[in-house]
Image (cartoon, rainbow, N blue to C red):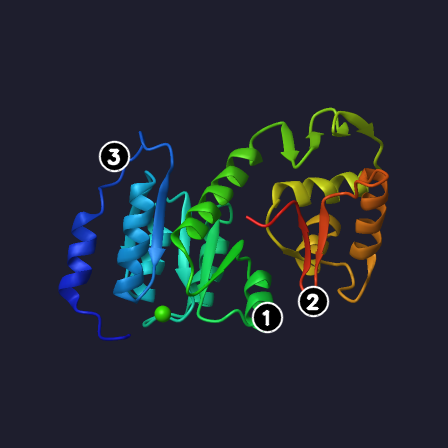
Amino acid sequence: MTDTPHSELMDLAASASPDGQEEAVASGRVLLIEDEPGIVDFVRRGLEAEGFAVEAALDGVEGEQAALTRSFDAIILDLMLPGRDGLEILASVRRSTPSVPVIVLTARGELEDRVAGLDAGAVDYLVKPFSLAELVARVRAQLRVIAQASASTLHGEDIEVDLLTRKVRRAGNPVQLSTTEFELLVYLVRHQGRVVSREQILGSVWGYEHDPATNVVDVYVGYLRRKLGRPGDPAPIFTVRAVGYRLGSAT
Ligand code: CA
């Protein structure tokens, strides 16, 4: 849909609140970059009903400019856009504001697309068509991740991680972890409910100089599962076939 009427763009821009007025909105500011007016309408209404302030851009160029020049708590990004490709926007957002969560909308759930996006730094995916409940849950989950990033204690399922004392508990019982196991668990808890690829884990926990062909991630996930698991109650770290791992149930 490349022939979006300009008047619609103007209407959307005019209805977006000016900067600074959303401070009181606890749910946060969301930038939606999507060229299908029907989806824009649906998402905007749904998120605003949940208390989010939504700004919409109907083409890639305008969307990228908004993402790079104004501040948002989350960005919802369609991949197929007129003007500028979604993955290119994703890459420039990752360079300029790496802490802002991006939820990518894809037309199909093609695995290669998903992995390519994960490698480019997307934090989450929604495959069209999606429900509003699903979208709101994803946005909330992303904002929780941001809130957790500044906390000193992380919680994931029944696991508690104290970042200052580096003590770990599962259901209140202490668990002794090595330094690498601890860093891996912190990464998984920070991304709980979402699938993280082996490459993402490797890059964040071991550093990018590591050989990408290594199976060290799988080995350490195995160690973590063994230490966190109890008889009849396995650790809540799930394998997502061909992609990676997820701590906790999917959000
Ligand atoms: Ca599109």
- The earlier-in-sequence mark between 1 and 3 is 3
Q: Which residue is mark 1?
A: 111
Coordinates of residue 44 in the picture (x, y in percent): 29, 51
Which quadrant of the render holds ligand 1? bottom left
Cα separation, mark 1 vs mark 2, equals: 8 Å
Neighbor class of circle 1 (other Cα within 10 Å; few <14, some 14-19, many 20+) is few
Q: Which residue is mark 3?
A: 21
Residue 85 figure quarter: bottom left
Labelled pair 1, 2 in contact (Cβ < 8 Å): yes
Is label 2 in a helix, a strand or a loop?
A: loop
Closer to the camera, 38 or 243? 38
- The earlier-in-sequence mark between 1 and 2 is 1
The tag on residue 242 is 2
Q: Amino acid at mark 1?
A: Leu
The tag on residue 232 is none
Q: Is residue 21 left or right of residue 211?
A: left
Closer to the camera, 91 or 250? 250
